[in-house]
Amino acid sequence: MGVTNRLRHLDDWLRGWAWASIVVNIGIVVTGGVVRLTGSGLGCPTWPECRTGSFTPHGAYDLHSAIEFGNRMLTYVLVAVAVGTFAAAWQSGRRDLRRLALIIALGIPAQAVIGGITVLTDLNPWIVSFHLLCSMAIIGVAVLFLWRLDRPGPAVRPRGPVVALAWATFATAWAVLYVGTVVTGSGPHAGDKDAKRNGLDPLQMSQVHADLVFLLVGLTVGLLLAVIATHRCAAVRRAVEVLLVVELAQGLVGFVQYFTDLPVILVGFHMLGAAIISATVTWALIQVRENDG
């Protein structure tokens, strides 16, 4: 009984850390958005120091410095969660969980370095894009970690048209996320009033982004119909339905923000939606690929 209780406690511990990893990495996307949307991207104009000779905004403390410095401090929360996740995964003795937890843990300092390069290059929009996408990737790995808690990887990866459609949906979602960062890099909300833009036409890039969103929604509808036609289990269908709902909500926010001249609050919600898209499209892909029950 003691061993059973210990295993159950470890399982609950792992699940808690997995959810914490997902939540804090979505959170850092949102707080990073606050930095950009308030023009605080260079509130700490150097890195790893905030000001030359100081790791804090001491002596030059204003709202922008506070916002940027606060976002940097949240990195320590991510580190703590990543360390806790890895420690719990190590106790489990499972190699697959240890590997995924290590990827999450290594992603945090990598993200910090990319953030530093972003500051040192005066918010180069292409590096800013990579900075955001790195967080999206960590979210996806954390979702996979959560799935693996109860389901070790299958010995044989299932194939077929439905799985291929799920992969196509996943790839298109990532294309939407990437082009979304390019749209951002061509428009306002640069993170600082003097930050350069990528030089692309915001209208043209927004059209490309919208076209990809329509493609993503169409593929997701097709995936849902395929899941229903092939009698996949309720969990698979529910995962794809949730993805579709998130896409439609995100698309609605995107269109409204575009036609209302990009109000800060809507752009912030759109960034939150992008992070949730990363999580839900990963979950849907895993469900379709591995859940045949």
Image: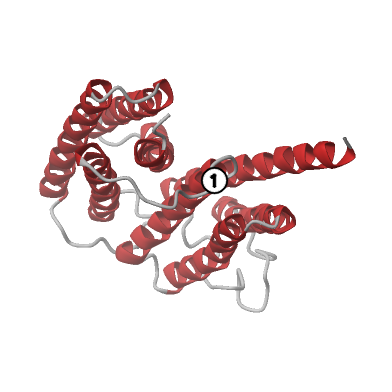
Q: Position of residue 21 (x, y in %)?
A: 59, 47
Q: Quadrant of the N terminus?
A: top right
245 vs 52, nearest the viewer:
245
Q: Is residue 18 left or right of residue 153?
A: right
**Element at label 1:** helix
Identity of the residue drawn at 37% across and 32% down:
266
Image coordinates of residue 116 in percent, x first then y, are: 50, 70
Residue 99 is situated, as x and y percent measured from the top left of the image, at: 56, 62
Where residue 22 sits, quadrant-wise, is top right
- Horizontal arrangement in the rendering, residue 225 relative to residue 82 (left or right): left
Q: Is residue 190 visible?
A: yes
**What residue appears at the point 35 percent right and 36 percent down from the top-left corner?**
288
Q: Mark 1: which amino acid?
A: Arg
Whether 54 is drawn above or below 216: the answer is below
Q: Residue furthest front?
A: 155
> Going 75% across and 56% down the picture, which residue do you hit?
91
Instruction: Name the residue that disc number 1 marks.
Output: 148
In the displayed orientation, state which residue is furthest to the right: 2
Q: Quadrant of the C terminus?
A: top left
> Where 256 falls versus 35 (above or below)?
above
Which image quarter: residue 148? top right
Structural crowding at the residue carrying mark 1, measured as other residues with C-alpha within 10 Å and reported as few (<14), some (14–19) or many (≥20) = some
Give above or below for 108 relative to 174: below
Q: How are the colours assigned in the image?
A: secondary structure
Compared with 87, 251 (above or below) is above
Determine the residue located farthest toward the bottom in the rendered image.
53
